[in-house]
């Protein structure tokens, strides 16, 4: 029986394409996968370090919470309080210059770029239809999908978000070589604008819209609108589907912990940086507001997601977050004027509500450090 199965298996692999071979070879995504992909450089101009607090590293990470941090192979943990570094530490192979995969934190970065594209006049409104910018996305029900539906994960597209299936949609997007074709061939299976379904395809389509409207790669536009104005300390990398191809907008942005922290500081101040309003605050306020008109998987009103940003209500604090596959976090706590960044190889398998349990541990640790 097993001998009969082997040729059948290889026929399936051959039909699926070379991306399955890559998925089977690498088996799982990693935080340094930029080394196996082609990348665009997101250039900085004049690096400006985040200042250190006078209390820099005077408090240790809480001993009671340290085992989880270590067990999950954390590489970086930072706490920014009042726009200065209160705590910063690196483990394993991490350092202040180590580039690490954002995974789905990239979705929140793409949301910022949509805001800039509206501000710059490239996009008129988030209520425009996707097909107005991507003509290949207009057949059937797809013509009813709006940019808003992509931002709020309510497009109704047919997509398998599984990260373990080498034959699935996400594996094809991660290891495949033609994101444009994959995205524009998708079908709509639910009426858009009603149901929250977390799909990486939504963000990838936003990335394609940005490239089409601005005439620039995502990396070029991000460099212009954020990386240079923020004075990022290091160039970043954004992985591509192939040489000269499209950025993997839904993931695969690679930067340092300090530069991720700068994104958090910008969000914390609703688009203002060093006294200048880089991105209009109204867009960020919408981004950090739950898409409560939508129903979640259980039929409840969505109170945990905005425009590609996660929203957590914890201890009477409204917390906005960018979240990645293995516990990559940019956590903004406006009531404490605090930003938390955590990078690492693993996340907790336990869930509390919509979130992996480790995020609560990081918030508690940061609160202890700044008290």
Image (spheres, helix red, strand yellow):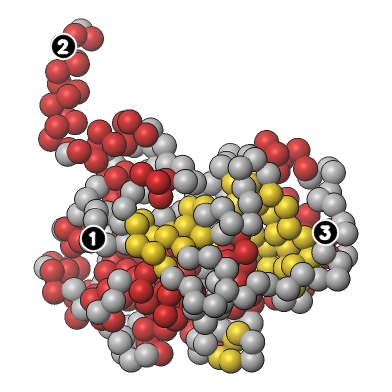
Residue at 34%, 70% (x, y): give it. 218
Q: Check if mark 1's residue and mark 2's residue have beta carbons within 8 Å.
A: no
Residue at 31%, 53% (x, y): give it. 38
**Which residue matches tag 2?**
4
The image position of residue 166, as x and y in percent, is 31, 36
Residue 118 visible, this angle: yes
The image position of residue 299, as x and y in percent, is 46, 59
**Which residue matches tag 3?**
57
Residue at 54%, 77% (x, y): give it. 46
- Helix, strand or loop at mark 3: loop
Q: Give me the C-alpha separation between circle 1 and circle 2.
A: 39 Å
- Helix, strand or loop at mark 1: loop
Q: Which mark is residue 154?
A: none
Residue 365 or 156: which is nearer the viewer? 365
Quadrant assignment for the C terminus: bottom right
**Which residue matches tag 1?**
245
Q: Give me the C-alpha separation between circle 2 and circle 3.
A: 61 Å
Quadrant assignment for the N terminus: top left
Q: Give me the C-alpha separation between circle 3 and circle 1.
A: 42 Å
Q: Residues within 10 Å of mark 2 (few under 14, many from 20)?
A: few
The image position of residue 133, as x and y in percent, is 21, 78
Return the residue found at the far front.
Answer: 46
- Helix, strand or loop at mark 2: helix
Residue 203 or 305: which is nearer the viewer? 203
Mark closer to the chain start, 2 or 3: 2
């Amino acid at each position: 029986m097993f001998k009969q199965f082997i040729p059948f298996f290889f026929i399936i692999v051959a039909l699926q394409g070379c991306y399955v071979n890559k998925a089977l070879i690498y088996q799982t995504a990693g935080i340094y996968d930029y080394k196996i992909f082609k990348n665009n450089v997101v250039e900085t101009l004049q690096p400006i370090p985040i200042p250190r607090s006078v209390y820099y590293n005077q408090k240790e990470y809480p001993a009671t919470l340290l085992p989880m941090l270590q067990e999950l192979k954390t590489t970086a943990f930072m706490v920014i309080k009042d726009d200065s570094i209160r705590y910063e530490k690196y483990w394993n192979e991490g350092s202040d210059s180590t580039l690490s995969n954002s995974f789905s934190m990239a979705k929140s970065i793409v949301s910022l770029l949509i805001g800039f594209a509206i501000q710059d006049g490239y996009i008129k409104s988030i209520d425009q239809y996707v097909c107005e910018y991507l003509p290949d996305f207009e057949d059937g029900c797809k013509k009813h999908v709006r940019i808003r539906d992509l931002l709020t994960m309510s497009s109704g597209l047919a997509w398998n978000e599984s990260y373990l299936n080498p034959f699935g949609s996400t594996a094809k997007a991660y290891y495949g070589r033609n994101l444009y074709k994959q995205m524009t061939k998708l079908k709509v299976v639910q009426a858009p604008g009603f149901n929250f379904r977390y799909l990486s395809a939504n963000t990838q389509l936003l990335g394609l819209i940005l490239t089409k409207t601005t005439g620039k790669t995502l990396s070029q536009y991000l460099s212009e609108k954020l990386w240079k104005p923020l004075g990022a300390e290091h160039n970043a990398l954004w992985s591509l589907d192939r040489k000269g191809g499209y950025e993997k907008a839904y993931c695969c942005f690679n930067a340092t912990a300090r530069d991720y922290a700068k994104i958090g500081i910008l969000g914390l101040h609703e688009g203002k940086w060093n006294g200048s309003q880089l991105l209009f605050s109204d867009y960020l306020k919408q981004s950090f507001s739950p898409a409560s008109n939508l129903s979640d998987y259980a039929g409840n009103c969505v109170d945990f997601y905005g425009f590609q940003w996660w929203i957590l209500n914890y201890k009477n604090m409204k917390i906005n977050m960018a979240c990645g596959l293995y516990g990559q976090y940019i956590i903004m706590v406006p009531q404490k004027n605090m930003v938390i960044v955590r990078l690492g190889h693993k996340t907790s398998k336990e869930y509390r509500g919509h979130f992996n349990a480790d995020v609560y541990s990081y918030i508690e640790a940061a609160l202890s450090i700044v008290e």
